[in-house]
Amino acid sequence: MSSLALLQDLAAERSPASRAVAARRLIVDMAASERGCHLGGSLSVIDILLAAFDRAEGDDGTRVVLSKGHAAAGLYAALYVTGRLTENPAPLYGKAGHPYTGHPGPKVPGVAYPTGSLGHGLPYAAGWAWSQRLKGLPGLGIAVSGDGELQEGLVWESLQVAAARRLGNFVLVVDRNGGQNDGLVDDISPLPDLADRFRAFGFGTAEVDGHDHAALTAVLAGSRAGDRPLAVIANTVKGKGVRAVEGKAGSHYVSIDADRAEKWKRGIR
């Protein structure tokens, strides 16, 4: 069976585990493109994205925004295995004339806002939540960020506004994989007592295993009719699924050849 046929079979199964495997294999394919991709963060965030898109499946107005836009490969893979993209983005990633660039933009179906400059996705999602609230409509604004991204001042400005406006329909999910572009978060700008920081801003908080689909689904469930926005700390492993790079800061951006990609994909279960 070809790699593409296997991916299609896995995605068609629709189980959380099979979709995650299919998505991770697609991400590795994108790392084998001419330009490579932000592999580590795409692999760590994929389970979060799949759970968030499942939450949005009911078309109640929920909007999912990937604020850590450099994990675009993960976003494209998630859109594909959930059926929001009809074409496989991996062979087209980074190629002229196609929208699957290193940071996502609205030419990609399912992408409402361009992200890449860190911190910008949070106000997009919070603004969406605010507009839904003003119009008396249901649905959440879900922003998916990284822990390195929390070093951006705009993040905290946005959280302050969300709390002040009592946006109970705004959810921030932090992909806490412990790494960023130039090393480990703990070595660069540590985030001790992170849940307490969010609570100090007026947020409800939850902490989950960011690779546990059931736990992520449970924390994102419901209409969130209250007036406290929610911050979810999703503990993840950078490079999750590829043993050669799991937990390594060096997995942040990776470019590999096709042979290595096939080897890595065979190990993803």
Image (spheres, rainbow, N blue to C red):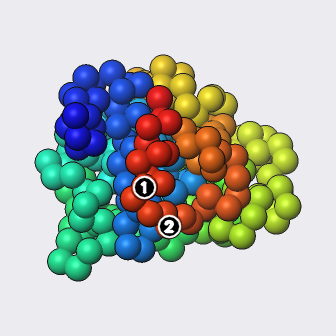
Nearer to the camera, 127 or 98: 98
What is the C-alpha distance between the residues marked 1 and 2?
A: 12 Å
Residue 259: mark? 1
- The residue positioned 29% from the left and 57% from the top of the image is 90
Residue 252: quarter of image: bottom right
Nearer to the camera, 186 or 93: 93
- The residue positioned 70% from the left and 53% from the top of the image is 248
The spot of residue 44 in percent (x, y) is: 55, 45
Of the residues shown, which amino acid type is indicated by label 2?
Ser
Nearer to us of marks 1 and 2 is 1
Badge 1 crowding class, 10 Å Cα cut-off, few under 14, some 14 to 19, many 20 or more, is: few
Residue 217: quarter of image: top left
The spot of residue 243 in percent (x, y) is: 61, 41
The spot of residue 154 in percent (x, y) is: 60, 68
The spot of residue 61 in percent (x, y) is: 26, 41
Residue 255: mark? 2
The vertical placement of 23 against 11, above or below, is below
Q: Is residue 154 left or right of residue 129?
A: right
